[in-house]
Image (tube, rainbow, N blue to C red):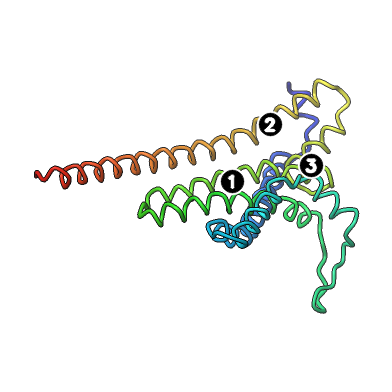
Amino acid sequence: MNAFFAQLPPGFLLQVLTGMEVNLQIACLALVIGLALGAPSAFGKLHHGMLGAISAGIVGLMRATPTFVVMFFLLNAVPPHIYLFGISFTLSGTMIVVISLVPYSAYYVAESGAESIKQLRLHSPLAALLFLPNLARAFFVLVMASSSGAAIGVHESITTIVRQAERMSAAGDRLALFAMGALLFGITLQTGFALVNLLRRHLAGLVKRQMAVAAMVDHKELYGYE
């Protein structure tokens, strides 16, 4: 075991944590852009006629868009320097990963947002607040999916682990390193998911109690007793 840790460079854990910060940044950007694109689709889905059909079609297309296909299309088919309205934009590897995650992010926002709007229209603000834990859950899913950046050399946490594993000669050491990375990554994400589920269950309990009180009030009014 000492020989295994001796192969790790000084500050390796710090490098992995710094890479995880990149994962979090990618997830945050993808979620913000997804909110900007998904919110109009959420409102559009609730309309009837042409607008509703177009919005539903867009949401369905975003749902079916594979992340890896978008990522490798941007990497190979789009020039790294883009000029838009006379302004030059550099499409970095990190931004490529962000954009590739936007379809899923926007789809999730549109679906959860539409349900939240329905609950608001039904005068159930507590049920509408379930949008928040849903959004948090989407964020942690995006953090996991951001590891796809390792495929194109983005310096996130998995990239750091893979590059260190390539320097190890023994297969057992490489497996141990991958297991350590998975444990570190998994603990962080599972903690986040656990907190989100606690918040979701708390809000769901409040909604049930609110519905029970409303049903009791309706029953009293129907039968006319205090």
Q: Position of residue 141 (x, y in %)?
A: 63, 42
Q: Position of residue 64 (x, y in %)?
A: 72, 45
Q: Label 2, secondary structure: give it.
A: helix
> Can you tell which quarter of the image residue 33 is in?
bottom right
Discs 2/1, front: 1
Q: Which residue is the site of mark 2?
A: 182
**Residue drawn at the location 53% of the way across and 57% of the way down:** 46
Q: Amino acid at mark 2?
A: Ala
Residue placed furthest toward the front: 49
Q: Answer yes or no: is residue 219 visible.
A: yes
Q: Label 1, secondary structure: give it.
A: helix
- Residues at circles 3 and 1 in contact by the CB criterion of under 8 Å: no
> Can you tell which quarter of the image residue 52 is in?
bottom right
Q: Position of residue 215 (x, y in %)?
A: 25, 42
The CA distance from mark 3 to mark 1 is: 22 Å
The CA distance from mark 3 to mark 2 is: 12 Å
Viewer-closest of 210 and 75: 210
Location of residue 24 with respect to 33 vertically, above or below: above
The CA distance from mark 2 to mark 1 is: 20 Å
Residue placed furthest toward the left: 226
The quadrant in which the C terminus is found is top left
The circle on residue 138 is 1
Q: Which residue is the site of mark 3?
A: 159
- Decide which of tag 2 and tag 1 comes sooner along the chain: 1
- Decide which of tag 3 and tag 2 comes sooner along the chain: 3
Residue placed furthest toward the bottom: 86
Q: Answer yes or no: is residue 35 visible.
A: no
Discs 3/1, front: 1
